Amino acid sequence: MAQHGRDEDGLAWPLYFRAFGEYKSPVYIYVLALVFRVTGPSSLVARLVSAVAGLVAAALLGLLGTRLSSSLPRRRLIGLIVFLAAALTPWIFEVSRLVFEVALLPALLGLFLLLLQRAAKSEQWSWRICAGLGVLLGLIFYVYSVGRLLAPLFALGLVFFLTRRRWRSVVLTWILFAVTLLPLAVFTVRHPGALSERFKHVTYIKPGMARSQIAIRFVKNYARDFSPWIWLVRGDPEPRHHLPGMGSLLVGVVLLAALGLLIVMWRHRRDAWWRYIVFGLLVSPIPAALTLDHFHTLRLIALPCFLLVLTVPATEFLLNEDGPRRRVCRATLTILVLLILLQGAFFQWRFHAALPREDAFDSYYQELLAKALERPERPIYLFDKTPAAYVYAYWYATVWGVSVDNFRRLGPGESPPPGAIVIGHELPCKNCEVIIQRGQFQVYREKTVDS
């Protein structure tokens, strides 16, 4: 895409990218292609894109904290606390270290909430605000698979802002959001069922399943996604998404968010903005609750964003409380902020000191590819159990300046010729000489008849 504006199948400027037996969301791919157009392909650059997106998300949430505060002298302090909490929260940080489409979603959601908060102060929204909200909802829809459900839900939540003077603005926002979905309608007509194929493999909802069973399973999954034990102690069980042995949220953040929720229900329950934040918190787990995985970090990524927003009323309350409880409130806030900083620093230390998660990321593939490239035989055959493993060879070869013409993928039922060098993926060879084996992969030489 960076070089020719075409995907690996030769399709020009696709809306969704066919890859690994499914279709990938486009926003992150186009952002990365634009960056690679300038820098060239690089693992470091790709990771920096995600890292910057995570930092931007934390900054936007911090800026939102300053805008939400009614205490002018303490706005910057509240914004700084929210920024540090967001930047140190393992959930946000770990997603920003993965080169996945979801890495952009917290920043887009933060920008959407920032613009919505500005709109909430006005009885009539300008067309620019309506257009901005509609486009951001569209980007959330296209950035990651869960956005296809979250964006319509977030759009539905705008009903909280309906008033006699504002209803036209809300309806215009809905219309503009719908306009962003027109390319999706064209894509769906041309590729019926393409975007739902992945969902069929990750959901527990199967044909013939009783509605009561579906409802019970959904409620269990939904309740589990709000489990304090998982939030604070266990975290996501998938090592690719989360560092084992720690929770995904910081204790101080959860306590502040819980207090913030109580304050909202007590003092701001008639405020459309805060009702929208509570609504966003409640609908965020819905996409994940429809799938088989237990506490999936990526599909739940909107949840910590709304929790961080809820820390604002709690922080402001503890800072502004006067009278006999002032010292207690200030001391409580100080303890919670120190707890956020200390636990966040401890997580950072553990994250960077941990052993490489080689099996989760197949990082040993570079060693196997180097061994295969040392051999004179060409082409090198790629024998994959799944339709994804060949990308490792293509990616590292491109980064190393090696032409992908040196490789040939073997299709189902094909066998490598005698004497060929093969990189096999979870496929034990029967008549071969293994050169190196690591994890799921092995490099081997197919034996000739004589040998």
Image: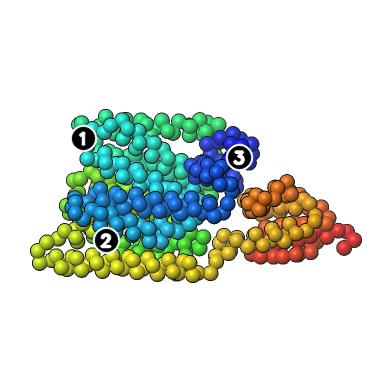
In the image, taking residue 178 as reference, residue 1 lies left or right, namely right
User: Dot 1 corresponds to which residue?
Assistant: 123
User: Dot 2 corresponds to which residue?
Assistant: 256
Precedes in sequence: disc 2 or disc 1: 1
Residue sitting at x 46%, y 43%:
143
Precedes in sequence: disc 3 or disc 1: 3
CB contact under 8 Å: marks 2 and 3: no
Say few, some or many: other residues with alpha carbon within 10 Å of mark 2 (under 14 / 14 to 19 / 20 or more). Answer: many
Residue sitting at x 46%, y 49%:
102
In the image, taking residue 209 as reference, residue 361 lies left or right, namely right
User: Dot 3 corresponds to which residue?
Assistant: 3
Q: Amino acid at mark 2?
A: Leu
Q: Indicate the position of residue 408 as horizontal and vertical percent values.
A: 73, 48
In the image, taking residue 276 as reference, residue 104 lies left or right, namely right
Quick one: 228 or 242, which is closer to the camera? 242
Look at the numbered disc 1 and give the secondary structure of its residue. Answer: loop
Look at the numbered disc 3 and give the secondary structure of its residue. Answer: loop
Say few, some or many: other residues with alpha carbon within 10 Å of mark 3 (under 14 / 14 to 19 / 20 or more). Answer: few
Q: Indicate the position of residue 298 as horizontal and vertical percent values.
A: 45, 53
Distance Cα–Cα, label 2 vs label 3: 48 Å
Number of marks in the rendered image: 3
Q: Amino acid at mark 1?
A: Glu
Say few, some or many: other residues with alpha carbon within 10 Å of mark 1 (under 14 / 14 to 19 / 20 or more). Answer: some
Distance Cα–Cα, label 2 vs label 1: 31 Å
In the image, taking residue 307 as reference, residue 400 lies left or right, namely right
